Image (tube, helix red, strand yellow):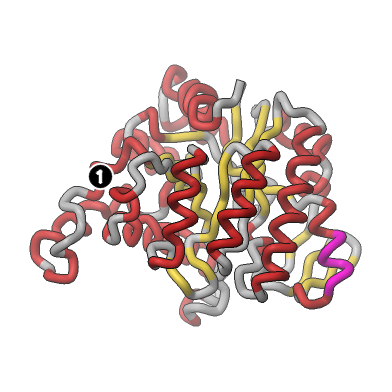
Amino acid sequence: MRIDVHNHAIPETVLELLRREPLYGVTLTGSRWRGGVHVDFEVVPSFADPAAKLKELEAKELDAAIVSVAPMVFYYHVDEGAGERMAVEANEGLAEFCAFEPDRLAWLATVPMQAPVRAVAVLRDAAAAGCVGVEVGTGVAGRRLDEDEFEPFWAAAAELDLPVTLHPAYTEGVNPALAPFYLENVLGYPFDTTIAIERLICAGVLDRHPGLRIVLVHAGGYFPYQAGRLRHAQTVRPELANSPAEPLSYLDRLFFDIITHDPLALEFLVRRVGRGQVVMGTDLPFDMAPPEPMSLLRAAVDDDVARAIADTNPSALYGFA
C-alpha cells in the first residue's frame, strides 16, 4: 500500500469554527480562504471531504494517507484558550475524517504549542483518540522548538512513541527579501525546517529524548545537503563547543519526504540519508505538491527502493497495516 505521510486536511469542524469566530481572522467566501497567516487559497474538496481525498490519492497512484492539518490552522499566535479550542476541533475533525475509511486514512494530532502544558494534555487526548503522530510548526510564532518551555512536549511525544512531523509556518512577512516571488514558501519553508532540526540537534533535544522520531517535510530542507557545514563549525566555533560533533549521527531517527521537485536531488537524498529514512510525501492538495509524485520517485530510484519509500517505510513508521 503506497502511503502519503505529508498530506493536508482542513476538516469541517475547523471550517465551521472559522466561520463562527472572527477572532481567527479568516474569511471563507465560498471555497476561498482569505486572511490568517497564509496567502489566499482555494479550499478544494479534498481538504474536507474524505471521499475526494481518496479519489485524489488514487489519481496520484497512491493508496492511503497520514493526514495533518494545513499549517495555517496551527494558530500559535492567538491566546492559549483560542489555540487549544482550534486544536481540539481540528483533532476531532481529523478523527472523524479518517473514520470514513480507517484502513486507508490515519491522522496526526495538532496541539496548542503556545501553551506547552496544555499541548501535552491535548496530545495525550489525541493519542487516546487514535492519532498516529503529531505535527507541529518549525517555530511557535517567534519562539523556537528547542527552548526549555517545550521540553514537556518532547518528553510526552517520546513517551507516547508518536513521530513528530515538523512543518514550516509563519514565514510570511518575516523576511521582506522573500516576498515578491512567493519565496516565503519556495526558500523560506526549507530554511525554517533546517533551522528547526539543527537547533534541536545543537541544543541536545534529541540526546535528551532518544526515543524521538522526527519527520522533516520538503526533503528535510537544506539539512541533508549542508549538515557537513554544521559539523565543521562545531570544530572551530566556541558557540558550538557543547553541541554534538556529528549531526548526521541522528539519521536513524530522522525521516525525509520526497518533495525535491528534482529526481537528481531526490537520488542524492536517498544516498545521503539511506533508503530506510525516506518516505512518500506530497503536500497535497496544495499547488506546491509534485504533480506526479510516483513518477518523481521512479525517476530517482529503482523499483525496489521506490517500494520501500512509498510502502514499507511509511507503514513501519506509523504502524499502518
The residue type indicated by label 1 comes to: Leu
Residue at (80%, 38%) from the top-left corner? 50
The x and y percentages for residue 262 are: 45, 44
The residue that appears at 53% across and 63% down in the rendered structure is 116
Range of residues picked out in magenta: 16-21
Asked whether 286 or 49 is in front, the reply is 49
Residue at the image point whose x is 77% and y is 55% from the top: 89
Q: Secondary structure at mark 1?
A: helix
Q: Is residue 12 left or right of residue 180?
A: right
Image quadrant containing the N terminus: top right
258 displayed left or right of 91: left
Q: Badge 1 is on which residue? A: 248
Q: Is residue 190 visible in the rendered structure shown here?
A: yes
Give the left or right position of residue 13, taking residue 212 as reference: right
Picture quarter containing residue 56? top right
Q: Within 10 angstroms of label 1, few (less than 14), some, or many (20 or more) residues?
A: some
User: Looking at the rendering, which quadrant does residue 264 occupy?
Assistant: top left
Provide residue 213's location: percent of width, then percent of height.
42, 41
Q: In the figure, residue 301 lies in which quadrant?
A: top left
Q: Is residue 6 magenta?
A: no
- Residue 67, x across and y down, in percent: 66, 42
